[in-house]
Amino acid sequence: LFHGGDRFDRRLVLTAALWVVCASAVAVSFASLTDNIWLIGASAIGLCCAFVIYPLAIGHANDRVHGANRIALAGGLLLTYSAGAVVGPLVGAGVMNIAGKYGLFVYLGAVAALTGGFAFYRMRATPAVPADEQGAAQFMPRTSRMRW
């Protein structure tokens, strides 16, 4: 089992995932003009990286907060995530009205680039959490049984 810090700095992996999502969004915009196989490949790579952004951010944030502040942190992160889930589609739809059907990917790429730039800035401005201070991975059981 896993008993220690990560092999790579979470901030580096998070920043790389954001930039891959950005590159994927640009690739989807161009691939949609040419061939479907490139569209599927770029979408798959971008989605795989997009799904790790939130867990990486939560893991990194929890490494920086101790004690009872973790509950407030979890609430703040969930509220921020929820606000983005509400505002994001509204802005994305507005961009699509202006830029056309590929405007969604332009919007996703811009958001990923801005967030990736901010993550890179923060990575340069603050030191990494030492591996011995990082929390160990917590493997959680399923909370509900799926019945087919």
Image: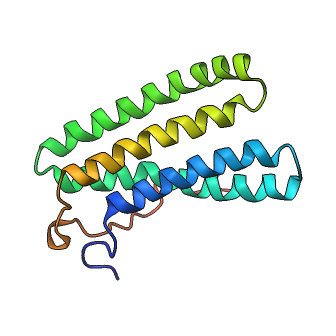
Q: Position of residue 69 (x, y in %)?
A: 14, 42
Image quarter of residue 41: bottom right
Q: Position of residue 39 (x, y in %)?
A: 79, 52
Q: Residue at horizontal 42%, vertical 34%? A: 81
Q: Is residue 70 above or below residue 142?
A: above
- Asked whether residue 82 appears in the rendered view, the answer is yes
Which quadrant of the rendered structure holds the N terminus?
Answer: bottom left
Depth check: give the residue in front, 39 or 75. Answer: 39
Q: Residue at horizontal 65%, vertical 34%? A: 106
Q: Is residue 109 above or below residue 57?
A: above
State left or right for residue 17 relative to residue 40: left
Q: Is residue 12 above or below residue 84?
A: below
State left or right for residue 78 relative to residue 105: left
Depth check: give the residue in front, 27 or 133. Answer: 27
Depth check: give the residue in front, 11 or 110. Answer: 110
- Asked whether residue 148 appears in the rendered view, the answer is no
Q: Residue at horizontal 41%, vertical 62%? A: 13
State left or right for residue 94 relative to residue 135: right
Depth check: give the residue in front, 6 or 144. Answer: 6
Which quadrant of the rendered structure holds the C terminus?
Answer: bottom right
Q: Position of residue 65 (x, y in %)?
A: 16, 49
State left or right for residue 67 relative to residue 125: left
The number of callouts visible is: 0
Q: Residue at horizontal 73%, vertical 47%? A: 28
